């Protein structure tokens, strides 16, 4: 089973396309830097599947702005998604992989 997680609603459509090609996929819309929501998602996946074998931890965003016209809000959002969310993902999934005795995290 593949769980696709994204901040945008398009994740549902992409996972539907995966299902059409005879693979199982479930789309989850998530504000990825939200630790509580991410934790709940990981718990739900482990409860439903019994384990998590692979975490593809590749969430990233970018704002292409000139320094003088850029905003601190955009900077903080970039750091939250590109750095903090990756940390959260590893921190939440690693204990399950350790318990299972196997797992991989890809970034």
Image: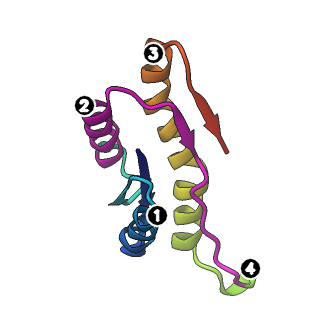
User: Which residue corresponds to the image point at 46% horizontal and 63% vertical from the top-left?
Assistant: 18
Q: Local crowd at mark 1 within 10 Å, few (<14), some, or many (≥20)?
A: some
Q: Nearer the viewer, mark 2 or mark 1?
A: 1
Residue 18: mark in rendering: 1
Query: Total of numbered circles in the picture?
Result: 4
Residue wearing tag 4 = 67
Say whether disc 2 or disc 1 marks the residue closer to the N-terminus.
1
Q: Which residues are magenta?
A: 37-65
Mark pair 4, 3: CA separation: 46 Å
Q: Is residue 78 above or below residue 55?
A: below
Mark pair 1, 3: CA separation: 26 Å
Mark pair 2, 4: CA separation: 45 Å
Residue wearing tag 2 = 47
Q: Nearer the viewer, mark 1 or mark 4?
A: 1
Q: Nearer the viewer, mark 1 or mark 3?
A: 1
Q: Secondary structure at mark 4?
A: helix
Q: Local crowd at mark 3 within 10 Å, few (<14), some, or many (≥20)?
A: few
Q: Nearer the viewer, mark 4 or mark 3?
A: 3
Q: Quadrant of residue 100?
A: top left
Mark pair 3, 2: CA separation: 14 Å
């Amino acid at each position: 089973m593949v769980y696709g997680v994204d901040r945008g609603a398009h994740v549902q459509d992409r996972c539907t396309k995966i299902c059409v090609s005879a693979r199982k996929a479930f789309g989850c819309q998530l504000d990825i830097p939200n630790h509580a929501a991410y934790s709940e998602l990981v718990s739900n996946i482990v409860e439903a599947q019994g384990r998590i074998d692979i975490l593809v931890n590749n969430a990233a965003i970018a704002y292409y702005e000139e320094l003088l016209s850029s905003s601190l809000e955009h900077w903080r959002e970039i750091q939250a998604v590109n750095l903090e969310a990756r940390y959260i993902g590893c921190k939440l999934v690693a204990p399950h992989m350790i318990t299972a005795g196997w797992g991989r995290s890809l970034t």
